Structure formats: structure tokens, C-alpha cells
Image (tube, rainbow, N blue to C red):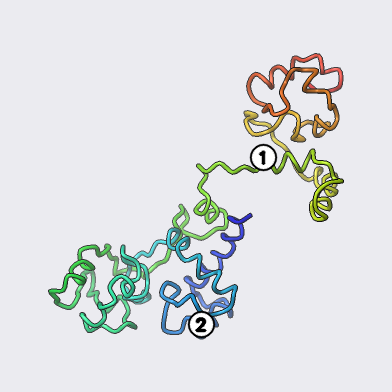
Amino acid sequence: MLAMNQALMLKHLWRILQNDGTSIWVDWIQHYRLRNSTIWTFNGATGSWSWKKLIKLRPLLQNGVCYKVGNGSSFSLWQDIWHARGPLCLSYPRGPALTGLPISSLLSSVLQQDQWRWPASTEADIAEIISQLPPTNPTTSDQICWRNSAGKFTVQSAILLIQPATMQVQWHGLLRDVWTADAKGGSWGWRKLLRLRSALLPYIEFKVGNGDIFSIWHDPWHSLGSLIRRFPRGPSRTNIPIAAKLCGDCGRRLELASYHRYGVH
């Protein structure tokens, strides 16, 4: 649930970055909250509780977005993350003073056609900035893309960013409890949730694949529902452990077991 909540919050930050003029809320944020800063350089210590929660997600957002430099007319020279070092005003606070380019400068101020044109400087900070400049495409506009195949933000892609697919999510234990737990125990909210099981089940389809996720006894993959609730002595009658998955040898043993007289086949 945390990943889902964070992904939905990232959607708001993505809309602020896009700033396409279709949202009154985004316009308000740009003019009254960010003002002369960007989402990357805004002081997150001020504002409402919800705004502070959004700002704290900036590191996640930065991992998901990609700034593609075009003609430089949209990106802030010092405050956007078009550079590998992030906002240059944070990485190189003396940058504006060393170059004579104010904090409000656009990236186009150091671009001429397809070439970078930075003010001459012998300062190490400026040399380091120049050594890591990205390629440009002056025939296109600047673009902010999401790091997926479509280049567009989706909640699903944000969840994968927050919680990679390689990370094992322990949903199964929770689901097992949902289908087999005693509705008389636990908190009031938990009891209310469990009472909705019978109403929820007709709308859920358990599609059996290789069986490595579903529990033989707990999950309602069978037309009879959760087998452990229907046949409490099933595990002992078939010698198939209560924690067994539907896959492999346990699945074959269930299919061949004499327990089929109860309809488990």
C-alpha cells in the first residue's frame, strides 16, 4: 500500500513538471508556491503537511524522469536536473557568480544552434560542469520524459520504480489470512473486511498458471473455494502440507489423491 500511495503522490509531482496549462492546481503551485524556483530547488521546509510529503518524494521522482535537452528554451540553467549533477545551483552554488548568468537564466543562454557556449572561465567548478554536458537537439523542444518505453508517467511504472519487480512482495500471507481467517477475531476494521469475503469472491478470478503462487489449501483457486475451510482434514488425508503450493509434486499428489471423492479434482 505504501508503494501505491507514493506512486499516486508522484503523479502530482509529474503534473507539476509537465506544467501544460490544463490544471488550475498546477498553475497555482507554479505561481504562488514555487515562484522563482523549481520543484527541485524549492525549500521543502515550508508549506502544508501534504505539500511537505510531496516534496520528500523528489529523490524518487528524480530516479524516474529524464530531461532531454532540445533548444533550451524551457529548462532552467541552474535549477532543473538536465545535467548529470542535478540542479547546478545546489551542486555549484558559486556558478551564477562565476559565469555572470543569473539564477533565473534559461538553458538557451549557453546554447547557440547545436553547440554549447559557456562563458570562458578557469574555475574548476565550471570546467567540471562543462565536462559532463549532455547532447543537444536544437531542432526540437526540451522534453521531460518518464523512464519507460512510452516516456509517459503511469502509476504502474511508478510502483515498479519504487518497488522493483525483483523485490519479493509478501502479499500471499495477507491473502491467505483474508480467505481463511476467523472473522470473530482481530480489530473492528479487520472483522468488517473479512465479512466482505463472500461478496468479493464472485468478482475475483484465480487463473492457475504454474501454481508457484497459489496455496493448495488456503487460496480459493478451486470452484469449491478455500479447500481448508471446506475440508479441514484435507492436509492429513492427503499428506500434503498446509503450506504447500499448487505447483509441482504437491499439485500432482492432490490430483491423484483419494480425496477426490469430496470433489477436489
62 lies above or below 36: above
Question: Image quarter for residue 222?
Answer: top right
Q: Nearer the viewer, mark 1 or mark 2?
A: 1
Dot 2 amino acid type:
Arg
> Which residue matches tag 2?
33
Q: What element carries label 1?
A: helix
> Which residue matches tag 1?
172
Nearer-the-camera pick, 48 or 131: 48
Nearer-the-camera pick, 107 or 104: 104
Q: Is mark 2 on a helix, strand or loop?
A: helix
Taking 177 as reference, is 249 left or right? left
In primary-sequence order, the first of circles 1 and 2 is 2
Q: Which mark is residue 24?
A: none
C-alpha gap between disc 1 and disc 2: 43 Å
226 lies above or below 251: below
The quadrant in which the N terminus is found is bottom right
